[in-house]
Image: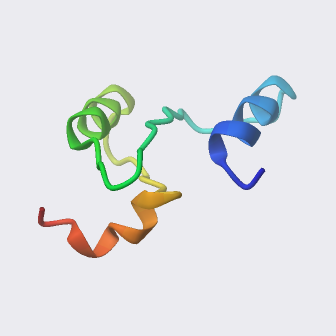
Amino acid sequence: MNDIGFWYPILKRSGVNTPKTIIVNTYEDKFPVREIQEAMFKIGFPCFFRGGNIAASLKHKWEE
């Protein structure tokens, strides 16, 4: 229940103002760089990247 994929759609439907948001799912040790880049370009810059699940544990591997 602490997953943005769970609570963000509920929040959005509630009518609360939210920033442009695109959810990119990560699986196990895979970090979908291309999908993240595409989402960032769709939203525009500056943008905020929030990592969750495996993305948070991969923050130290950003050069890869």
> Can you name the residue that lies furthest to the bottom here?
60
Q: Nearer the viewer, residue 55 or 39?
A: 55
Report whether 63 appears left or right of 43: left
Q: Nearer the viewer, residue 10 or 14?
A: 10
Q: Residue at x 42, y 53 (%)?
A: 49
Q: Nearer the viewer, residue 19 or 33?
A: 33
Report whether 15 appears left or right of 39: right
x then y, percent, for residue 45: 31, 42
> Can you name the residue that lies furthest to the right here?
14
Q: Residue at x 28, y 41 (%)?
A: 32
Q: Nearer the viewer, residue 19 or 52?
A: 52
Quarter assignment of residue 38 = top left
Q: Residue at x 30, y 49 (%)?
A: 30
x then y, percent, for residue 22: 49, 32
Report whether 20 appears left or right of 30: right
Q: How is the image coloured?
A: rainbow
x then y, percent, for residue 24: 44, 36
Quarter of the C terminus within the rendering:
bottom left
**Number of numbered markers:** 0
Report whether 58 appears left or right of 48: left
Quarter assignment of residue 9 = top right
> Can you name the residue that lies furthest to the front here?
28
Image vertical order of residue 28 relative to residue 7, above or below: below
Image vertical order of residue 64 relative to residue 16, above or below: below
x then y, percent, for residue 34: 20, 35
